[in-house]
Image: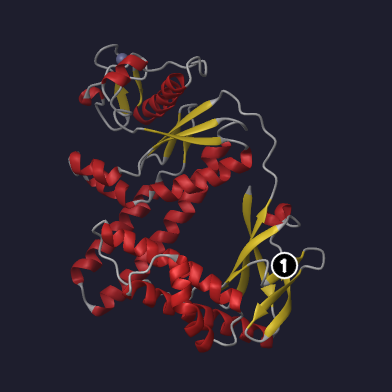
Amino acid sequence: MQRTIRVKLSPSTAQAELLAETSRLFTAAFNAVCRVGWEQKITNGVDLHHATYYPSKAAYPTLVSDLLVQARVKATEAVKSAIALQKAGRKVGMPQSAACPPRYNVHTYKVDWERQTVRMSTTGGRQTIRFDIPDYCVQYAGYPVDTADLMNQDGVWWLHVVVTVPAPAVEPTEEVVGVDLGLAQPAVTSNNQFLGKRVWKDIEGRLFYLKRQLQRKGTKSAKRHLRKVRGKQARFRRDCDHVLSKQIVQSAQPGATIVLENLTDIRKRSKIRKQTKTSRRVHSWSFAQIKGFVEYKAEGRGCTVAGVDPRHTSQACSCCGHIVRNNRRSRGRFVCRKCGYELHADLNAARNIAAKYHASVAICDAGGLPVNQPIVPTSTLLALE
Ligand SMILES: [Zn+2]
């Protein structure tokens, strides 16, 4: 499996200038390829290479060929996804970057873990630069390296090195952990864990209203302030998602299966549903990010991640399977109208999510995993889908 190590470079003043120049030219090459791809609607890497390689080589003669190629590879991805979004009806402009991190590979850099130095191509030839490894990724140092991205953050140079480490030798177990993601309670698992912090919702709410006020104001300074708030919100959400995904993965034993609702279609769903204040905010919070974080951390623990259809997970009774919208009497509590079963609403949903996974496995390969929790009868769930 692949892990990313962030190592801190200690270049000399002259080397730092070379790194800055390399980054500047790499970004310029990236933007130039994006322009060609966007204007001529080219999304094929080979075609873009033919259209841009020699002009780029002439424009940026100090950038080594492989970095030019990597700039084109990154630009191809950017153009491809922008054109795909445009085809899907979204409003997008030509992809351009203010600082596109140079991508290094076997041709352009070499790491010496023992000496803690990296030899890397710059606009001023190959340079040997010392680095430090932060404590939290020392465990991954020394493994074979793949690519690396050069980043500058507040004047400090970092190399994000992708390394290939052996996956933990863990046998898959039969444990299944259903996870209900929400706002009031960020995550509840079917094994009774209440994860994340309730205060996140208040912070998110404050940022949301602040953004809306600034959008209404529309003045130049309001727009500038809005950009800052957007950045702050993105960082806040990323931090929350890191904390939450770590807690989710640690709530499962190594080898377990973690089951999430497939919420990528949430935009489509919220059109069907009544647009409530909650659904609007849920759908703006990226599900793809938390899912990606959970998958990354699960891999390190020898767990797998599965997704299930989110329909009826909050309206079904996890004891008898009865599904009625007003089963859910209040946000906090679930009370079944049929059997009288009473439970924390999110916990009920988490158990339904686990049950849905059990049901889907039982269908996929007959004689699948034994079911060891109170579940919704498979027949009821299938009848409704
Ligand atoms: Zn019931």
- Helix, strand or loop at disc 1? strand
Picture coordinates of residue 118, whole percent (x, y): 73, 71
Q: Is residue 254 left or right of residue 199?
A: right
Q: How dense is the environment of label 1, judged by Cα within 10 Å: few (below 14), some, or many (20 and up)?
A: some
Residue ID at (31%, 24%): 334
Q: Residue 132, position in %: x, y?
A: 72, 67
**In the image, what residue occupies the spot 31% across and 29% down?**
314
Q: Amino acid at mark 1?
A: Asp
Would you say 220 lies left or right of 192 here?
left
Q: Residue at x 51, y 48 (%)?
A: 293
Q: Is residue 162 above or below residue 108?
A: above
In the rendered image of this protein, does residue 272 appear above or below residue 236? above
Q: Quadrant of ligand 1?
A: top left
Which quadrant: the C terminus? top left
| Residue under the image location 62 percent in, 65 percent down | 148
Q: Which residue is mark 1?
A: 132
